[in-house]
Image (cartoon, grey):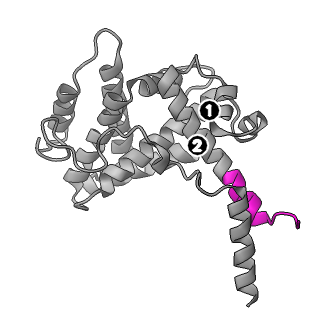
Amino acid sequence: MSPRSASVNEELRRRSKERLLQAAVELVGERGYDATTLGDIADRAGSARGLVSYYFPGKRQLVQSAVHRLMHRTLEEALEREPRTGEGRERLARAIDAILGLARDRPVLMRQHMAGLLQAEVGFVPCPEQRRLAELLRDTVSRYGSQDVDRDYPMLRALLMGAVFAALVPGVPMPAPELRAELFERYRLDWKLGVPPDAEAPGGTTCDPDLSRFFATGVPDGPDRVEQQDRTDRTDQSK
C-alpha cells in the first residue's frame, strides 16, 4: 500500500487534536481537574499518550484550550442562532446569557477553568481557541456601539469572568438571574433580550451532553475512510 499523502496525515493529526480537546472537556466536567490525568484524556480520545505532549505543553494548557473552544463555540452558536440579527444590543444580551449559561449548565468544568486561570505557574494561556473567543466578544462590543473597543472589550471580559466566579463560589453562589440583571442594567439592555430566565430556551441554548458538534473529530470517518477519500480526490484530479 502506498504511503499516506501529506494531506491525509494532516487531517489525521487535526482529528487527533480535536478528540483530545473533546475528551478533556468531557472528563474534567465529569470528574474534576485533579481526578483527570493526561492518560485518561488520551484513552478517552483513543489516542497515543505521546500525542498529548506533542500538541500541548501540559494538562493545564490542554484543559484551558478545550474550555476556550467550548466557550467560543457556545458563544458563536448563541450569536448566530435564528432569528439571526446584527443588532448590537440583542447580540450583547445573547453573549451574556451564553456565558452565564455555561456556569449554570457546566459548573464543575467552569469552576475548574476559573481556578486554573488563577494558578501562578500557568495562569492565562493565549491560544487559538482563546483568540477566537476574544474576536467574538470584541465584535459584540463593536456592534453594541463601543467607540473604544480596546478599552471596552477587556471590561466586558472582566465583568463576565466576575459573574461566572460569583455564580460558582462554593457555599455562597449568586443566582444567575441576579447576575444577569446587574449586567443588563450596566449595559442598559431590556430584560426581554437574549434568553430571559423565565423564557423558553430556543434551539441551541439548552445544556446538551453531546459536545461533538463543537469538535471536528470526524468520528464516523476512520483513517481508512480518510485515505479512501484522499485516493478518490487524486483520481478525480487526474481525470
Q: Secondary structure at mark 2?
A: loop
Query: Which quarter of the rendered picture does the C terminus lie within?
Result: bottom right
Write down the residue under mark 2: 127
Q: Is residue 202 left or right of residue 71?
A: left
Residue 198 drawn above or below residue 132: above
Can residue 63 be seen in the rendering of this structure?
yes
Q: Quadrant of the N terminus?
A: bottom right
Residue 21 percent location from the top left of the image: 58, 40
Percent position of residue 65, x then y: 56, 38
Say which element carries label 1. helix
State which mark lies toward you, 2 or 1: 1
Q: Amino acid at mark 2?
A: Cys
In the displayed structure image, the side of residue 99 where residue 216 appears, left or right: right
Q: Mark number for residue 91?
A: none
Q: In the rendered image, which quarter is residue 183 located in?
A: top left
Residue 27 in the image: state x and y as whole percent.
54, 28
> How many residues crowd around disc 2 within 10 Å: few (fewer than 14), some, or many (20 or more)?
some
Check if residue 155 falls in the magenta segment. Answer: no
Work out whether residue 65 can be spotted.
no
Q: Residue at x 17, y 26 (%)?
A: 178
Name the residue rendered at 31%, 8% in the picture.
Answer: 171
Which of marks 1 and 2 precedes in the sequence? 1
Q: Judge from the rendering whether residue 187 lies leftward or rightward of residue 80; answer left or right.
A: left
Which secondary structure is most common in the magenta stretch?
helix
> Which residue is at 35% across, 15% downward?
169
Q: Residue furthest bottom?
A: 239
The residue where tag 1 is placed is: 61
Query: Which residues lie in the magenta part?
Result: 1-14
Vertical comparison of 60 with 67: above or below: above
Q: What's the CA distance linking mark 2 and mark 1? A: 9 Å
Is there a contact, CB below 8 Å, between mark 2 and mark 1?
yes
Amino acid identity at mark 1: Gln
